[in-house]
Image: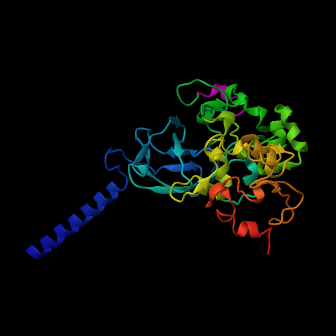
Amino acid sequence: MKRAALHQLSGRLFALTLFLLGLLSVVGPATGNVFAAGPEILSPRPGAKIMARNPMTHLIVRLENDGLLKVKVDRDGETIVPLVQIEGDDGVYLHFRLPLQPGVNSYSFLPGNRRFTLEYKKILADLALKALDKDVYLFHQGESLPPDCVACHDLLATETVQPVGIIKQLGCAVCHQSIIEKGTFKHGPTINLECLRCHRQSTEPLRIGFPVIGTQALCLTCHQQEKKWLVKKVSHGPLVLGGCTLCHDPHGENYKGQLWADGRLGLCIACHSNMGKLVRPEAPVPYVHGIIFGSGCLACHDAHATDQEFVLKRPINELCLSCHPTLLRGGGHPVGRHPVSGPKDYLRPGRRHSCTSCHDPHGTAHRYFLIETKQGGKLCRGCHRR
């Protein structure tokens, strides 16, 4: 009799345990609020690739409950609360602004621990958008908006939608206020909320996207004085590719000219990474041209286009002598009558003889920026063969 009672009691305890486990699966561990259904991610889809200039995206979530549950998003201990919570006919819509880092970003909902990921790749120009795979998620690139955004946003009448944040702005600022407020130096159309001056718009169906005529052509419609660059003999790579926004942020940045990094040096070595060795303290080049730490790359190079090779502002020797005027006092260098210019460079076929035939204008391991040994050595024997 006792064994039967114990068996019956064990069964009841097992059933109670199952009930409690089931309850915990739908109850937040700290709040006591019940999920009628888990958070439904409307956009962007979990696992999607986000390609954008700014490391941020908008997360739209729908909950099937009475709106009392306080859902948050966690990223590595950082708690992100929704910017907007709106009750609709079919649930509660939550709007989060998620920070992104290059690569895979992992998030989880609180309460609970349901996880999802997004992949972020920073782009500086629409050049990277020419060939996209199916996993890339872009706002405004399909129909007018992702379907779940249309419930709250109307692109034809955005002034009727209350802006996000404390500053009351209209139109695109509803979602893009952080872009509009970004940076010390701002683009005129951004300040005046004239987004459609640059972004393409159509009405059947309504779409807003990147400029249809290309970035360079678009920029030159206002910056017409810069068309002079198009007829120069040598152009900087971004200008050739038509990617003005590779260097300039079209909305706003903290550096003059709306550059996204210091234009004297930091911006240049982002692409010309081989020159990074000149400024890296962990592996310094023994002799670095001082101008690099002063006026920077733009002391000698034009950032857009010139008639000189290497996008130099002036011919090589003219540039060197503008700072070092005494080097030719004896009629030659490094000794009198030694040529410093000529039609042929014996060490570099196809190049003219100039100061850079012997000196590296950036920096080397040898004194006086010599391209070989500090005493000459191989450098001299390259022309004066015995």
Residue 5 covered by magenta stretch: no
341 or 105: nearer the viewer: 341
Residue 190: quarter of image: top right
- 21 to the left or right of 237: left
Q: Nearer the viewer, residue 177 or 228?
A: 228
On screen, residue 290 versus residue 115, left or right, reads right
Question: Is the C terminus in the top left, top right, bottom left or bottom right quadrant?
Answer: bottom right
**From the viewer's perspective, is 17 left or right of 216?**
left
- Provide the major secondary structure of the magenta segment: loop
Q: Quadrant of residue 304?
A: top right
- Could you say which is closer to the camera, residue 168 or residue 26? 168
Give the vertical position of 164 relative to 100 (above or below).
above
Q: Is residue 372 above or below residue 184?
A: below
In this view, the residue in front, 41 or 180, is 180
Does residue 161 belong to the magenta stretch?
Answer: yes
Percent of width and height locating residue 352 = 86, 58
Residue at 55%, 57% in the rendered image: 284
The image quarter containing residue 133 is bottom right
Is residue 267 among what the camera can see? yes
Q: Is 179 placed above or below 4 here?
A: above
Residues in magenta, as a range? 155-162
Q: Which color scheme is applied?
A: rainbow
Eyeballing the image, is 259 above or below 367? above
Q: Quadrant of the N terminus?
A: bottom left
Q: Residue 307, position in %: x, y? A: 87, 46
Return the x and y of residue 220 as percentages of the image width and height.
84, 36
The x and y percentages for residue 83 are: 50, 36
Instruction: Write the residue at 70% across / 56% down.
Output: 360
Q: Residue at x 79, y 53 (%)?
A: 336
Q: Is residue 1 visible?
A: no
Please tell me how many numbered marks the rendered image carries: 0
